[in-house]
Amino acid sequence: MSSGSTDGQSGTPTETDAQGGTPTDSEAETPTERDPTSAPEDLDTWLEDANGYDGDPRRFGPNSRPSISVGEETDDGMAFAPPVIEIAPGTNVTWEWTGHGGQQNVVALDGTFDSGRTNAQQGTCYEYVFSEPGEHAFVSEPHRDEGMKGAVIVAEPPTTGYDAVDEWMAAASNFDGTVVDRTDRDTTTVTVGAEGNGGAFAFDPPVLRIGTGDTVQWEWTGEGGGHNVVFENHDIDSGEVASEASATFEHTFDDTGQYLYSCLPHQALGMRGAIVVE
Ligand SMILES: [Cu+2]
């Protein structure tokens, strides 16, 4: 028998490193090596030089299993992708090593989580369940001075009071809980391919309130590639994806209800919308 080999080369951080621990480990022990003053006071400022970050956190809904790549290829492996995510309490986040950028680890500056010793092995995974609201800046320690940083923002999803809308829209990063009231007009417009969700992958405004008999007109910007408008809980569908700026789609809503829709090619990115018909 070989004498208990725990060479961090092949194993995942969770199985080889007592420090690196599973969520239960990190709750049980106080991280000793972490300087608490190293956690940034202002997260937005700290993230300004985060590689691959456009200032728009990717939001994930309450029942999602978000994954963050460790070593994004396009930044010489010196980036997390997505670097900044916003999640609901109770969400399990997985970091997956791409094998790019050499030795990497994932360490929260406030000591909340720590994948342990560095690893360059593609397929290495580290996961952590976030139970409490809060903001956690993290780095890959070997590249912390080269902008390889990110953050997990744990927050209760925004609410409108319309349950179906709230659940559906929790994954859309351009949704802040606002229901834009358009009950004062017969026809209202939604932009398809507005900025949001990490590109031109948003509907704007994302959530509308209209009256029965009102018409909604979707107008494509021509940005963000091919989009469509497909309703989740009603048989309303713009059909094939369109990418040109001249594309439009419209529908008149005769019945009250909460209407949920998405662009199918970008639904997973959070390109979602909702219409409340009163
Ligand atoms: Cu789309």
Image (cartoon, helix red, strand yellow):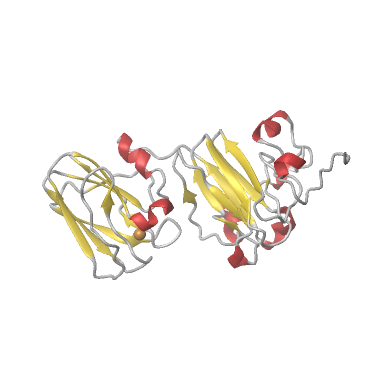
On the image, the x and y values in percent for residue 187 come to 15, 55
Q: Residue at x 46, y 37 (%)?
A: 156
Residue lying at 43% horizontally and 53% vertically, measured from the top left: 269
Q: Quadrant of the C terminus?
A: top left
- Could one spot residue 119 in this view of the protein? yes
Query: Is residue 69 found left or right of 58 in the rendered image?
Result: right
Please name the residue shown 56% across and 62% down the image: 52
Position of 86 relative to 239 (above/below): above
Q: Quadrant of the N terminus?
A: top right
Q: Position of residue 62 (x, y in %)?
A: 45, 38
Closer-to-camera residue (234/150): 234
State the image coordinates of residue 17 (x, y, percent, origin top left).
77, 41
Residue 63, percent across and down? 45, 38
Which quadrant contains ligand 1?
bottom left
Q: Is residue 14 left or right of residue 91?
A: right
Q: Is residue 154 above or below residue 244?
A: above
Residue 253 or 233: which is nearer the viewer? 233
